[in-house]
Image (spheres, rainbow, N blue to C red):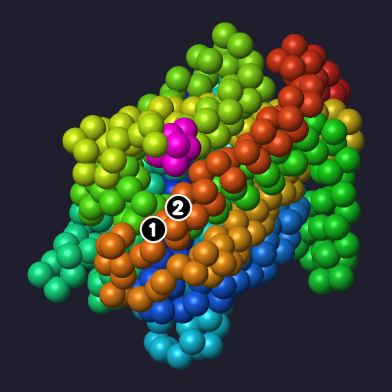
Amino acid sequence: MSAGALPFRLKLAFGVGQLATGAMNMSLALFLLFYYNQVLGLPGTLAGLAVGASVLLDGVSDPLIGSFSDHWRSRLGRRHPFMYASILPLVVSFYFLFYPLVDSEFGLFLWLMVFANVARTSMTLFNIPHLALGAEMTEDHGQRSALVAYRVFFVYGGIVGCVVLGFGLFFAPTPEFANGQLNAAAYPGFGLLLAVLMGGAIFWTAWGTRSGVQSSPGDPEGARATVIGALVRVFRDLLDSLRNLSFRWLFGGMLSIYAVGGVNAALALYMLNYFWEVGAAGTMLVVVGAPVGAMLGAFLAPAVFERWSKRAGLIVGTLGWAFWQTLPVALRLLGYFPENGDAVLLPLLVGMQVVQGVCVAQADVGFGSMVADVVDEQEYDSGKRQEGMFFASTYFAGKASSGIGAIVAGVALDLISWPRGAHIETAADIPAGTIVDLGVVYGPMVAGFGFVSVWCFSRYRLTRQRHSEILRVLARRRAGAA
């Protein structure tokens, strides 16, 4: 664990792997429900249930992988074996997710649920050890925020890359499909290219960080534990992490914000195609607005935290997300926003997304750095370092809540009688009242839950001064043990 500045090459290698995370999360959140529901014709409730069930089933793997990587012992350390092992299953399962070999309604439902689950679990096999590795690389307050900033930057870089490749290359308008997102034949190529790029990014990170940290040797009994013993240990580690009061408030806040984010991500293409009617090029610009803003905001975050605090950045970032998510939809529903086709509509939407992204980055960097600080507090209280379990718990919160969000979005589409099929090309094919209902679900109805998250985050009490005191005590303990 380093107490000084980390070299640029190491921070770069650590961050690059999150290109895969960003690309996968965006592709599944933005395109997956639309592809199976609108393009392939799977009912919204079934598509939402399949996506949601796959997320919830995959969530079981989070604490397992976190605990196993905390206790693992090998010549490659605790984290890297899992990172390497994730690459092949991720590449294969992600490709077949966008290349279903069945066409019946029930077949599509099972295919979506199975391959979405395998792809997500494979990504978890990389992500949990990778996030834990970041907490091991440095304990310096500022360097830890900087390292998380690199990670967040590349997450949103992966999102931008996914959107640009999707709308700019695979889903561009063609003579047969004025709306390229309705072209079923484009999706397999999209899945294949992203799968290969994600595998390459993960390998870069695993290889590039192999000498960047001397991982703890792990539990000598960890690799030899029986299955029952390992499961008992996982349950015990999970309970230990949830006993930490600081972590419980962070965990609760993220459950709420990820749930509403899951609804909005699943409905984004519906909004852009039919509520705002910005066209293919406009859709790409609006969708990349938030991640571009987040990439800029990621490197502002350490300075913001230095001047104020990580908690302040997390709270302000969450409030900013809720405000900018609600504002344009609310103004349109009230009749105070430019009409579709107006020359200023697209710049306004893009600008608001950029500002929203800057806010989101403060929340993302703050949250990741705060969880790493909680790991130190946990070691202070219990003598255990549980990076894997803490980050697994937060990762599970995100996936479980986004899975619930996907279910809610799918059910909402059926409740408002949303028409499906590749023949639904424009807003003219949809009743006006149904489009209004979509806006209500997407904007004001769900963004209000952001205030629940803010209330949880406000209860977090681990200050920078307290964290510094904890580090001094831990340093004395380690020196004594040595």
Marking on residue 432: 1
Q: Residues within 10 Å of mark 2 (few under 14, many from 20)?
A: some
Q: Position of residue 154 (x, y in %)?
A: 41, 40
Quarter holding residue 473: top right
Residue 7 visible in the picture: no
Q: For this view, does 274 lie left or right of residue 209?
A: left
Q: Main secondary structure of the magenta part?
A: helix
- Residue at the spot x=52%, y=30% of the render? 323
Q: Is residue 64 above or below residue 351?
A: below
Extreme residue toward the top, this view: 307
Kind of residue at badge 1: Ala
- Residue at the spot x=45%, y=90% of the render? 104
Distance in Å between CA atoms under marks 1 and 2:
6 Å
The magenta span reads 327-334
Residue pointed to by mark 2: 436
Quarter of the picture holding the C terminus:
top right
Looking at the picture, tell me which residue is in the foreground, 24 or 440: 440
Q: Residues within 10 Å of mark 1 (few under 14, many from 20)?
A: few
Q: Is residue 81 above or below residue 183?
A: above
Looking at the picture, tell me which residue is in the foreground, 91 or 290: 290
Instruction: Say which element carries label 1.
Output: helix
